[in-house]
Amino acid sequence: MGATIRPYSPAESLHSDRSAGDRARHREKIREALRENIADVIAEQAIIGRSGDTIIKIPIRGIKEYRFVYGDNTPGVGEGDGDTQEGDVLARGNKPGQGQQGVGGNLPGQDYYETDVSLEEVIELMFEDLELPDLEQKALRQVLAQRTTRRRGYKHVGVRVHMDKVRTAKSRIRRKLAREHARRAESEPPPPPSGNDNRLEERFPYHREDLRFRRRIPDEALESNAVVFCLMDTSGSMDTMKKYLARSFFFLLYHFVRSRYDQVDVVFVAHDTTAREVSEEEFFAKGESGGTMISSGYQKLLEIIEERYHPSLWNVYAFHCSDGDNFPQDNETAIRLARELCQVCNLFGFGEIKPDGASDWGSGSLLSEFEAIEEPNFRALGINGRDEIWPCFKEFLSREEA
Amino acid sequence: MARSWSVSDLETWDAAIREVVAGMNLDCYPQEFEVCDHEQMLGLMAYSGMPSHYPHWSFGKSFEQQKTFYDYGVSGLPYEMVINSNPCLGYLMRDNSLLLQVLTIAHVYGHNDFFKNNFTFGFTQAARVIEQFKAHANRIRGYTEDPSIGRTAVERVLDAAHALAFQCERNPGIRKLSREEQVEEAIRRSRPKLDAFQSIHRRPGVQTPDLQRQPLEPEEDLLGLVRDHNPRLHDWERDILDIVRQRMRYFLPQIETKIMNEGWACYTHRYIMNRIDLPQDMRMEFLVRHNQVVRPIQGQINPYHLGLAIWDDIARRDGADEEVHLLPPTEAMFQSREVDRDVSFLRRFLTPELMRKLDLFEYKTGRGGDVVVSKVSDEDSWRQVKETLIRNTGMNSVPVIKVVDTDYRSNRHLLMRHYFDGRELQLEYAERTLRYVYDLWQRPVHLETRLDGTGRLLGFDGDSFSVRTAMD
C-alpha cells in the first residue's frame, strides 16, 4: 500500500495560525523587557533627533530560557577543510557555530533580538504613566484632547454596520399596515391566497426606504490650552556632551507633548547672553557660542508669555536646561526672574547638566543658588549622565509628585 | 502559485520509491504525507512538528526566530519535517520543486524505518503520540482557562518545568529500581564483603544504611522527583510537570540519535534516488541538493555529513567492490541502527582513519575569546578529539545533575549534586535555574558543583542566591 498524501488545503492554512497566541505572549514579554530597559534605549544615541515614524532597531536581550548548561570554557569539535593545524585560530573574540543545533543544544549563545519598533511605539511605552502635571481649566478651552463620535438620531442612508435592525423592521411593519389600511379604504379586496396553502401570507419584502441607520456625530472633548517652553543654554561652555544631554531631554519632552496632546504649543528658545525664539530644527541642531546670561532667557520667556500666552488663558510649562555656568553677576537677576516665571507657570523645571568628569572650574552651580526659590511649582534637578535623563524626565512629569 | 507537480505525480513517485524501500529491506510504519505552505511549516517547526501542542510563549519565541532567519535569508526552511508516530507523518512544502518532494519522500522513509527499529524509540509509544500531545494540550488549556488557576500560574509552572526538563532519565533502556529493590541493594552493599581470611582480619565495622533517606539513590529525573516528593504541589501542578516530562521523554531519542538518524535517512535517500529512474534534469538537481545537505560545515559538525560518512564506512567494510551509493544497507548496518545511539555509534564506528579524512579537530576558547584549534586527529590526539566529540553529543552536552537528598539539613531543603566531569556550569544560568527549582520545590535548594577548581555549594532560599565553599 502506498503512502497517503493529503493535498494542501488553503482553508486549513487560514485558521492554522496556532502560534498566534504564543507569539503574542512572547511579544508581551519583550515589551515588558523593553520597558525595563527603556533608560538604556534612551541612552543609546540612536533615537535622538529622528522623526516619529522612523523605525528604529532596538537590540534587546532576548527572553532567555534558563537551564543548567556548561560554561563557554568547554571544548568542542568541528570539521575542518582538510589541513587544519593545531593552533589555527578559528574565530577572534566570539565563538564559531555552536556545534549541533539539536534540541539538546549546546551553550545557548547570548541571543540578541533586534526588534523593529517605531519611535512612536517606544515613546508610547515610555510615556504611558506621564502627563503634564497640574493642568488647570483656563477660560478658553481649546485643546482637543480626544476625538470620538457619539450617536445622535437616525438617517436613511449609511453603512451596513450602523444599521438599526429593530427600527428598520418597525418601519417595514409600519409601511405594511399603512398599505393594508389604504386598501381597505379603497375597499379593494385582499389579493387571493396564492397556491394551495391559505396560511401563506403575501410576501412583503423590505424596501430601501425601510432602512434606518444610526447617525453618529463627532464628539470632541476639550482640554485647556497649554504651551511648553523649551529653553536651552547654547553658550560656549555647553560642550558636545552637555548639548547632547540637553537635546536628549528636550527631544523626549517634545515627543511626549506631541504624542499625548494634540494641540499643545511648543516654543523653542535658545540663549547665550541674549535669547531668541528659534525653530525646531534650529533648536535641535544649533551650534554654540558666547557667554551665559540665563536671565536673558527668562526675560525672553516672560516677554513671550506676556505677548501670546497669557496665564489666565494658558497653562504654561517651562523647562530650562543649562550647565549652570552663569555669569555670577547675573545670578541675582536670574533668580528674581525665575521667581516671576513661577508665578505665571504651572511648572517651571530647571535641569542642570553636569556630565561626570566635566570640569567645575570657575563655574558656579545654579542648583545651589536656586535653592532659594521656594515656589512649589519649581523643580530643579541635576543631570549627570545619559542614564539620568530618563529618571529626571520622569521626575519632572510624574503624576504622583504633581 | 504555479506548481510543477500534482498530488498524482507524488503518488506515482511514491510507488516507485516504495518498491525500492521494500527491496532494501526497510521496515517502516505506514506513511502519511501532508502538503503545507511555508507559514504552516514555520508553525510546525516551532512546535517540533506536532500537529497539536500545548501553548507556551517559548514556542512563540522560536517561531519568531525561525521566521526572522527565514525572512532575512539566513536559513532556508528544511525540506523535511517528519514525526515519530505510527503512522509516520511527514510534511511536504507546497512551493518546493518536484525533485525536492521526491527527495524528501525518500528521506522520510529512512527516518520512518529508523523510528520503528531503533531501540531508543521503543519507549515513545509512537502509535499514541499524536493523541497524547493533543490530550496534553487540552489539559493545559483547561488549566489556563480555569478561573482558580489562570494563565500566569500555569506559565510559572511551565517556565520552571521547561528549565528542568533536560534533567531527565537519560537512558530509558536502564530499568529504574523500585523502592524495595533499592532498599535491598543498599542493605547488600552495607554488608561486609566475603573475606577468605576473615579469621585473621579485623572485622570491618558495619555501617547501617539510612533507609529513610529520599531518594535512596541519587535521582536524575528532577521533575518526577519534585512531582512525587513535594507535598505542597496541587494536582494540576503535578500534572503539568508530568506533561513536560513526557514530552521530554518523547523527544529524547531524537536528541540521542541525531547523527545516526540523519545519516541513515541520507544513506536511504541516496540509495533510493540512484535506483529510481530519474529524468536527466531531475538527476542534476538531485546531485546539487544532496550535496548541499551532506556537505561538511567548517568549524561545526553537520550531523547529516558525519552520520552519512560513518554509515558509508560501515558499508564499505563488508560491502563488495560496488560503489557505496549503490549498496543497500548491509547486515551490520541494520544491526547498528537497531542497538546503537549516537554515543555508542561514534564509539564503535568512528575510526581514526575516518576522523583524519573528515579532518575533525578540537577547539577551545582562549583567554582573549579567540577560538583556537587545540587538537587535531593525528596519531597522538585523535582519542581526545573523539572523546570531546562524544562528550558534546546528545544528552552528554547537558550537565548531569542528580538529587541526593530531599530532606537536607533535616529541613526539607533540596540537595542536588552536579557530577563534575571537567566542565563547569555557567554560573548565571545555574543561578536562574536554581530559582526555577525553588519555584517548584518551594523550599530552599542547594547545588553542589565545582567552580574555578574548588567545590562550591550554590544555594537559593527564596530571597537570595549564595555561593559557598563546599564543606567536603
Image (cartoon, rainbow, N blue to C red):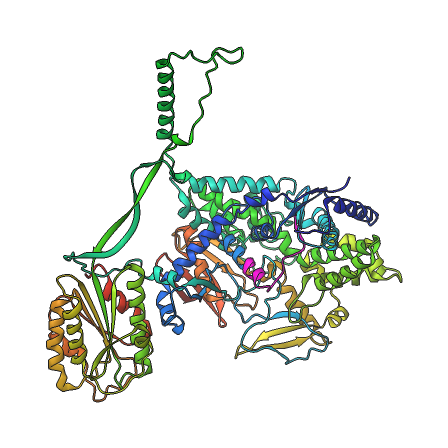
Residue range (magenta)? B66-83
Q: Residue at x 31, y 77 (%)?
A: A282
In percent of width and height, residue A75 lies at 59, 71
The answer to whether residue B194 is visible is no
Give the vertical position of B142 relative to A38 (above or below): above
Q: Which corner quadrant of the image does residue A283 belong to?
A: bottom left
The answer to whether residue B137 is visible is yes
Relative to B47, is B451 on the left or the right? left
In percent of width and height, residue A276 lies at 23, 78
Q: Residue at x 63, y 43 (%)?
A: A9
In percent of width and height, residue B263 lies at 72, 58
Comparing A253 with B468, the one in front is A253
Q: Residue at x 35, y 59 (%)?
A: A125
Q: As drawn, which residue projects farthest toward the bottom?
A: A362
Q: Residue at x 52, y 57 (%)?
A: B64
Q: As drawn, which residue projects farthest toward the right?
A: B321
Relative to A395, is B36 on the left or the right? right
Comparing B312 with B73, the one in front is B73
